Image (cartoon, rainbow, N blue to C red):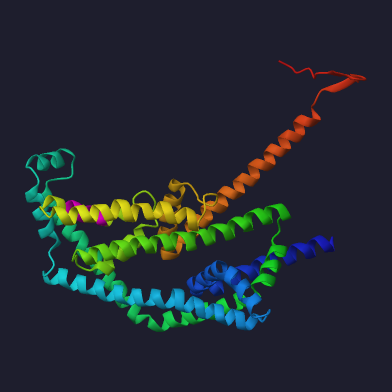
């Protein structure tokens, strides 16, 4: 009786200390999360650096961390700082009345035939005057939210640098000791070798595909859209470019939520050339970038269905914030992989049961089928 009791007590202790450890790490969840994500994405480069440096793990890990800093962290920090400044400036201009979003809607309204007002009224959307007020109110609320986030970032500068330091520190050790650490984790997972291989392989593949593929595609589409807005003289091109990049993470709708209304406004107000240029850039350049880059960077075999990506990304971001665009599709991929394993195992069990119930031999060279009840 002592051994089962000791085993259960140890299992309970294991659960308690694991939950306590996770609870301690929660304040730095984002730093740890992105440290792990960057380690998974740049691990192939770590292997090449190890080979280049003759197996010196510390030098290879430090070089890889510096590469991450120059490729990822510095550009993201510079873009975020410029975005905060631009967003705050837009909010101040809207608040002071220098930038009147409603005036643009009013110009588009005057270019439309009067029948459109009646159609909008019949659909329950109200007339275009109400639509103008709603757009103006939404723009003010959105810019105010961005300005408040900018103030929050400024107030939490110390916390940001602490989290950044933790992420880089963890990233160094994940690069240096990632392979043996991953081996220990695989050994500790209480699943069969088949399950561990399938699920961990799916985890790594989807994580790399989501970060490497989707972020590069989104950054490309946002950069193209921002440059197009800048070339056409549109207010706050960096802000709109970042919003387009953010929306490009969502399939089907994506960056068109930003550039399409602007193109329609140009076409309605008589600025046909700019409207045609923006439409061409949006449909051909931004739209086709996804078709060329995503299969090249992600691969067809690792891509989830678009509707799964859309729902899981929105749900993940609703629950986990900006981290959710990785966590959401990752959970969805593991969900599909786990149920695929379960269904395959069930099919194998059913196939084995059918084999056991195969025709029974009664004479040499002859078989007799089983009789079944009606």
Quarter of the C terminus within the rendering: top right
Question: Extreme top residue here?
Answer: 374
In the rendered image, the vertical position of residue 347 relative to residue 27, given as above or below: above
Q: Residue at x 24, y 52 (%)?
A: 279
Q: Residue at x 71, y 52 (%)?
A: 194
Left or right for 123, reference 84: left
In the image, 167 versus 275, the foreground residue is: 275
In the image, 230 versus 260, the foreground residue is: 230
In the rendered image, the vertical position of residue 36 relative to residue 190, given as above or below: below
Left or right for 1, reference 158: right
Q: Is residue 134 visible?
A: no
Q: Residue at x 67, y 70 (%)?
A: 179
Q: Residue 123's spot in the image, x, y percent?
A: 18, 39
Question: Extreme right residue here?
Answer: 364
In the image, 147 versus 10, the foreground residue is: 147
Quarter of the N terminus within the rendering: bottom right
Q: Is residue 180 magenta?
A: no
Residue extent of the magenta highlight: 259-265
Q: Residue 72's spot in the image, x, y percent?
A: 45, 73
Q: Residue 253's spot in the image, x, y percent?
A: 34, 50
Q: How many marks?
A: 0
Q: Residue at x 53, y 79 (%)?
A: 65
In the image, 119 versus 63, the foreground residue is: 63
Left or right for 135, reference 295: left
Q: Assign the magenta stretch its main secondary structure.
A: helix
Q: Is residue 330 visible?
A: yes
Instruction: Determine which quarter of the picture holds residue 105.
Output: bottom left
Instruction: Determine which quarter of the picture holds residue 75.
Output: bottom left
């Amino acid at each position: 009786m002592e051994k089962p009791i000791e085993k259960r007590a140890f299992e309970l202790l294991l659960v308690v200390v694991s939950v306590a450890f996770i609870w301690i790490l929660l304040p730095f969840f984002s730093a740890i999360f992105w440290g792990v994500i960057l380690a998974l994405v740049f691990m192939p480069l770590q292997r090449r650096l190890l080979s280049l440096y003759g197996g010196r793990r510390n030098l290879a890990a430090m070089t890889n961390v510096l590469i991450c800093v120059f490729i990822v962290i510095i550009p993201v920090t510079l873009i975020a700082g410029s975005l905060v400044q631009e967003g705050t400036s837009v909010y101040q201009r809207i608040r002071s009345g220098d930038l009147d979003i409603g005036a643009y809607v009013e110009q588009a309204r005057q270019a439309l035939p009067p029948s459109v007002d009646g159609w909008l009224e019949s659909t329950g959307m109200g007339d275009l005057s109400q639509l103008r007020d709603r757009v103006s109110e939404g723009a003010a609320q959105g810019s105010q939210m961005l300005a408040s986030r900018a103030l929050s970032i400024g107030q939490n500068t110390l916390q940001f640098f602490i989290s950044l330091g933790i992420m880089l520190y963890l990233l160094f050790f994940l690069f240096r000791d990632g392979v043996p650490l991953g081996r220990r984790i695989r050994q500790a997972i209480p699943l069969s070798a088949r399950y561990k291989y399938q699920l961990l392989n799916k985890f790594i593949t989807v994580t790399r595909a989501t970060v490497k593929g989707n972020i590069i595609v989104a950054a490309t589409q946002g950069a193209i859209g921002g440059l197009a807005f800048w070339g056409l003289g549109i207010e706050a091109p960096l802000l709109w470019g970042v919003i387009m990049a953010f929306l490009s993470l969502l399939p089907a709708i994506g960056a068109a939520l930003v550039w399409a209304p602007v193109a329609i406004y140009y076409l309605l107000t008589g600025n046909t050339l700019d409207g045609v240029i923006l439409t061409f850039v949006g449909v051909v350049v931004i739209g086709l970038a996804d078709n060329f880059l995503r299969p090249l960077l992600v691969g067809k075999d690792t891509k989830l269905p678009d509707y799964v990506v859309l729902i899981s990304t929105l749900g993940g971001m609703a629950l986990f914030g900006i981290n959710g665009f990785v966590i959401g599709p990752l959970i969805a991929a593991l969900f599909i992989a786990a149920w695929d394993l379960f269904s395959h195992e069930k099919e194998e069990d059913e196939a084995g049961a059918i084999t056991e119930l195969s025709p029974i031999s009664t004479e040499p060279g002859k078989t007799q089928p089983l009789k079944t009840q009606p």
